[in-house]
């Protein structure tokens, strides 16, 4: 199942009627260019697709680079200090925000033009533009550029079966060379690291060492940029927190024991207690006859960012909420813990070294129990784990009535037309289907604005809560299950593109680890949504062809159970490698469902859900006390 890992402040989409003329200090908004590219794609104007999409990617890069430069400059001009008084602290925060706003607007134009919707942000984070580019270049008979775009997309979406097949075909095409398979989004440290590993595998340890050193230098630079975009101690804009295999840097120092010991001790700065590295360090000490110190650069780096984190946490306590430029946002439970690192999500995760890429043991997240009460009258157990040939699986019927299904389907369509969801864009998983959908908070926002019935928005909210309670109860969890992400989504088969389909509507995958069918493993590491524990799909209709939900073995081929969607039917399961699953191609009609992901860790609760809870509480308060509800959705949502 797919979803949103970056819950952030909600920005309303920029509504512009035409592309702004290019001029000094004004950059064309990348969301507008992106929309123009998508529109051109469905008009089969592939030259325009390339022009607009390449422009969107360039604009996106320029906006990011400008923000980095401006924030670094303003941080230097207006530093924060632990000794500041409350008043001095506030003054520095405000001056820094004003400095950044002025600097950014001088470089790219009015900032409001570049505050795009969360959907567009996620499309760029997941490299969806490269999917469009790959197909456009293919239509224009540019296989070299198509291969480049396909490779770039596949690096962030390795579960995309069809793209993997396309890449294999490109390798055999005339005019396509190995040098064309480049990742356009790779950063310098990633390129150096990859090249270093290749040299190491070939036995060129001197060359590998030089490139590993270069990768470290570039990594520190990338970290500075990433932290400049940081909205707080655990929120990053447009960049996942990157984690690397430091042990490789240590092993290439074979024959240079002094440096090997130094590298081993540096590794242990970041991963205290790692047994295999402690053993290596002890061996080097014994061979050398003396001890050594970690690299000063790494030690300084660690001390510096611990101090930064402490300052940010102090600031959040002073202000009652954590801050970002010109806005404020809620604490999500950050903690000052030397064994934890900021994740790219809305909370903290324990740092798990992946130097040996260990296998993820396939077990249920917390409890192997099942069969608890279904809580709601009429909900019927259809199949349990045994009947579904797996572990921690359940199939239920009558979770919703026919009337509720129809209302939620209409809500999905209406919200999409009002400007939310995927706006009928191509599915991120197959070019043969379109997506439209809505999040809980966006539907409530549209309810306030009068664009959808508030009753329908409330139904979506209450339906998701009903599903959460049922899953929590049925699997007999001994702690609260929290929302990680919820989406009301419809998949529609594109007419004229269904002949000879051999792809899936959603490829076989697991929800919290990277499925590796060839190795029969599932790696619990980014870019997988590792914080998810349970998942559920609540179906809204059956009047379509195809679209069956399937569980498979870890080989991603052997189907162990198949579920035909219909109104009120819900399939729930634990999110790990024990439950690989996917969706067969929707070949005719439209398939609608409420997709839900849950976490047992409250630090990873969905921020939008917390905001939606407050809105619903305000509505209930209005109902009880008969007071007018004074909420400006543009401010509160």
Image (cartoon, rainbow, N blue to C red):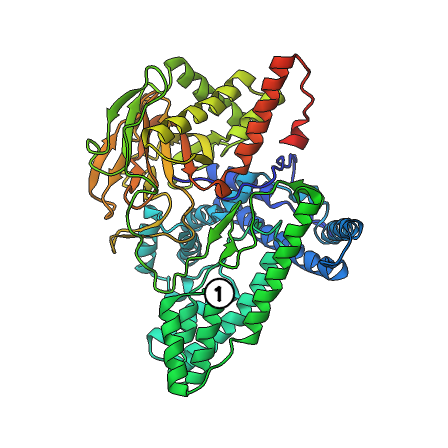
103 left or right, relative to 300: right
Task: Using the image as rendered, state which of residue 43 and residue 265 is in the foreground.
Answer: 265
| Residue 85 sits above or below residue 450 on the image | below
**Which residue appears farthest toward the bottom when viewing the image?**
289
Quarter the N terminus occupies: top left
Residue of label 1: 270
Q: Dot 1: what SS?
A: helix
| Residue 307 sits above or below residue 162 on the image | below
| Residue 174 sits above or below residue 396 on the image | below
Give the image location of residue 208, x and y in percent.
42, 77
- Circle 1 packing at 10 Å, graded few (<14), some (14-19), many (20+), is some
Give the image location of residue 484, x and y in percent.
46, 38
Q: Quadrant of residue 195?
A: bottom left
187 left or right, relative to 361: right
Residue at x 34% of width, y 43% of height? 365
| Residue 255 sits above or below residue 75 on the image | below
Give the image location of residue 120, x and y in percent.
54, 41
Q: Is residue 371 visible?
A: yes
């Amino acid at each position: 199942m797919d979803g949103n890992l970056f819950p952030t402040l909600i920005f309303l989409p920029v509504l512009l009627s035409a592309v702004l003329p290019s001029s000094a200090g004004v950059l064309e908004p990348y969301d507008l260019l992106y929309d123009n590219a998508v529109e051109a794609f469905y008009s089969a104007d592939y030259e325009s697709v390339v022009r607009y999409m390449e422009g969107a990617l360039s604009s996106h890069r320029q906006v990011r680079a400008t923000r980095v430069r401006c924030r670094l400059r303003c941080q230097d001009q207006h530093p924060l200090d632990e000794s500041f008084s409350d008043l001095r602290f506030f003054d520095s925060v405000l001056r820094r925000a004003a400095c950044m706003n002025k600097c950014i607007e001088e470089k790219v134009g009015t900032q409001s033009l570049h505050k795009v919707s969360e959907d567009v942000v996620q499309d760029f984070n997941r490299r969806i533009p490269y999917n469009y580019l790959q197909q456009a270049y293919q239509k224009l008979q540019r296989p070299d550029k198509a291969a480049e775009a396909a490779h770039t997309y596949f690096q962030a979406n390795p579960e995309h079966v069809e793209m993997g097949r396309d890449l294999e075909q490109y390798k055999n095409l005339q005019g396509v060379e190995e040098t064309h398979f480049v990742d356009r989004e790779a950063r310098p440290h990633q390129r150096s690291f990859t090249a270093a590993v290749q040299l190491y595998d070939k036995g060129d340890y001197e060359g590998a060492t030089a490139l590993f050193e270069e990768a470290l230098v570039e990594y520190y630079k990338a970290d500075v940029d990433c932290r400049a975009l940081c909205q707080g101690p655990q929120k990053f804009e447009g960049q996942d927190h990157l984690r690397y295999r430091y042990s490789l840097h240590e092993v290439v120092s074979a024959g240079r024991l002094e440096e090997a010991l130094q590298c081993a001790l540096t590794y242990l700065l970041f991963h205290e207690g790692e047994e295999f590295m402690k053993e290596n360090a002890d061996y080097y000490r014994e061979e050398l006859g003396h001890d050594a110190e970690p690299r000063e650069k790494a030690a300084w780096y660690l001390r510096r960012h611990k101090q930064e984190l402490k300052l940010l946490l102090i600031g959040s306590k002073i202000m009652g909420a954590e801050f970002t430029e010109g806005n404020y946002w809620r604490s999500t439970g950050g903690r000052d813990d030397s064994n934890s690192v900021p994740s790219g999500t809305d909370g903290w995760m324990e740092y798990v070294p992946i130097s040996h890429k260990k296998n993820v043991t396939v077990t249920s997240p917390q409890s192997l129990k099942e069969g608890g009460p279904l809580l709601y009258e009429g909900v019927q157990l259809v199949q349990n784990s045994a009947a579904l040939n797996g572990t921690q699986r359940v199939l239920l019927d009558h979770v919703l009535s026919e009337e509720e299904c129809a209302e939620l389907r209409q809500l999905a369509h209406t919200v999409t037309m009002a400007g939310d969801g995927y706006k009928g864009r191509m599915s991120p998983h197959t070019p043969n289907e379109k997506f439209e959908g809505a999040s809980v908070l966006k539907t409530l926002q549209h309810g306030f604005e009068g664009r959808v019935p508030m009753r329908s928005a409330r139904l979506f909210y209450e339906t998701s809560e009903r599903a959460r309670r049922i899953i929590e109860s049925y699997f007999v969890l001994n702690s609260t299950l929290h929302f990680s992400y919820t989406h009301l989504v419809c998949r529609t088969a594109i007419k004229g593109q269904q002949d000879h389909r051999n792809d899936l509507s959603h490829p076989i995958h697991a929800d919290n680890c990277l499925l590796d069918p060839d190795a029969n493993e599932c790696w619990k590491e980014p870019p997988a949504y590792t914080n998810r524990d349970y998942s559920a799909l609540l179906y809204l209709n059956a009047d379509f062809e195809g679209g069956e939900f399937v569980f498979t073995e870890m080989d991603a081929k052997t189907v162990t159970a198949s579920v035909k969607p219909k109104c009120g039917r819900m399939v729930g399961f634990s999110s790990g490698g024990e439950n690989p699953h996917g969706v067969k191609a929707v070949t005719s009609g439209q398939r609608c469902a409420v997709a839900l992901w849950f976490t047992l860790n409250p630090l990873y609760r969905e921020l939008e859900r917390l905001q939606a809870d407050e809105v619903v509480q305000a509505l209930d308060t209005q109902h009880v006390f008969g007071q007018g509800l004074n909420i400006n959705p543009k401010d509160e949502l």
